[in-house]
Amino acid sequence: MPPDGRRIDPYTVGVASLAWFELIGFLLGLLFGSFLNVCIVRVPQGESVVSPGSRCVGCGHAVRWFDNVPVVSWFILRGRCRDCGMGIPWRYPAVEAATGLWFAFAGWRMWEVWHPPAGVLHSFLPFWTLQTVGLAGLGFLLIGLLVIDWKTQRLPDALTLPGIAGGLFMVCLQAIFLDPGEDQITFVSKHLRLSSPGSFAARGNVFLTGPEALIFGRLAAVCGAALLLLLIRWGYKALRGRDGLGLGDVKMLAMVAAFLGFWPAMLTLFLGTMLASAYGVAEMVRGRAGALTRLPLGSFLGLGGLVTAVFGGGIIAWYRGLL
Ligand SMILES: [Zn+2]
């Protein structure tokens, strides 16, 4: 409390700190984006992302530390290597800026978690903090995969499989912080009953504890999303006689399910196929694509996943309201 006895308005303090959360998120995102550029070039080739350090693809000169500042250096160098003058694609600053913005968004979410409206308990703080860290990680993976698929028409297992494992690991960590009785499933006189979040009263026989329900539920979401896509893949092949959906797409959607759950993964699939179709039609109209042109579906799933991570909760709630 300040010396003159006035109380600090928590809202004013919060808004001031919001800028800090976003700024720290943005700067962290620039660093991760810079690393993501290394992954985008090296992962599809099976090369180490750790060593050697960044080099020019043209002349092999090591990039000097002051030429390696995210976004800024590309503009100072006017998109050319300092040694050989070879063009550096605008993709580099774009990936850095996109990752920076994504992490700034995660910073904003983190601020919301740490500044709940008056009356809301802080008991979910570690749970939602971990959720937000996962959100940042998912964006990192999706931005990387969407650029790699666009460039190489491939979605490397080296990103999708650790992505699935990482998403499930975050859920296991989150499960530690569920309150006793929260999310547990009980049998009450032959009715299956889901206890609501924050409910501590367990009446009836506990069928699954909260952490079990959360972890098994997410595992089921991953398997369900993967199986559904395998079915679509099989059906498409049976009807059209060619692959329309790669196994990489299957693993990528399973990864989204690991981080966000089953319905957000379905929304990602819906948005991704809509965007891919719109792009395909536009390219056909312009005469640049035929019915057999392969579209990088993973790139559109990546966009769909990012949109779902931001707006998914609202869209799914709105859709449920319609039914
Ligand atoms: Zn060079």
Image (cartoon, rainbow, N blue to C red):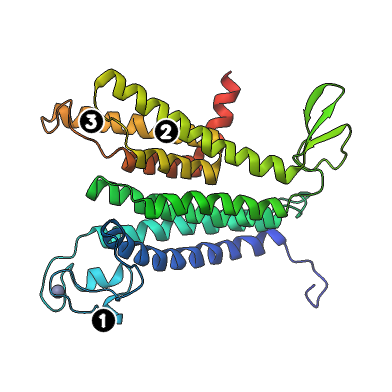
Identify which amino acid the numbered label 3 is placed on.
Gly
Q: Secondary structure at mark 1?
A: loop
Q: Residue at x 35, y 50 (%)?
A: 145
Q: Which mark, residue 64?
A: 1
Identify which amino acid the numbered label 1 is placed on.
Arg
Rounded to the nearest whole Å, what is the CA distance between mark 1 and mark 2? 41 Å
Residue 110 visible in image: yes
Q: Quadrant of ligand 1?
A: bottom left
Q: Of callouts 1 and 2, which one flags the residue occurring earlier in the amino acid sequence?
A: 1
The residue tagged 2 is: 269
Is 306 on the left or on the right of 77, as rendered?
A: right
Q: Secondary structure at mark 3?
A: helix
Q: Which sits in the foreground, 38 or 213? A: 213
The residue tagged 3 is: 280
Q: Quadrant of the C terminus?
A: top right
Which of the two discs, 1 and 2, sits closer to the camera?
Answer: 2
Q: Of callouts 3 and 2, which one flags the residue occurring earlier in the amino acid sequence?
A: 2
Q: Quadrant of the N terminus?
A: bottom right
Q: Which mark, residue 129?
A: none
Q: Which sits in the foreground, 169 or 100? A: 169
Q: Of callouts 3 and 1, which one flags the residue occurring earlier in the amino acid sequence?
A: 1
Tell me where residue 268 appears, x and y as whole percent.
Answer: 44, 36
Tell me where residue 230 appears, x and y as whole percent.
Answer: 41, 31
Identify which amino acid the numbered label 2 is placed on.
Leu
Which of the two discs, 3 and 2, sits closer to the camera?
Answer: 2
Res 92 quadrant in image:
bottom left
Res 82 quadrant in image:
bottom left
Rounded to the nearest whole Å, what is the CA distance between mark 3 and mark 1? 41 Å
Tell me where residue 216 appears, x and y as whole percent.
Answer: 64, 40
Tell me where residue 37 appears, x and y as whole percent.
Answer: 31, 62
Q: Are marks 1 and 2 in contact (CB under 8 Å)?
A: no
| Label 2 CB sits under 8 Å from any ligand 1 atom | no
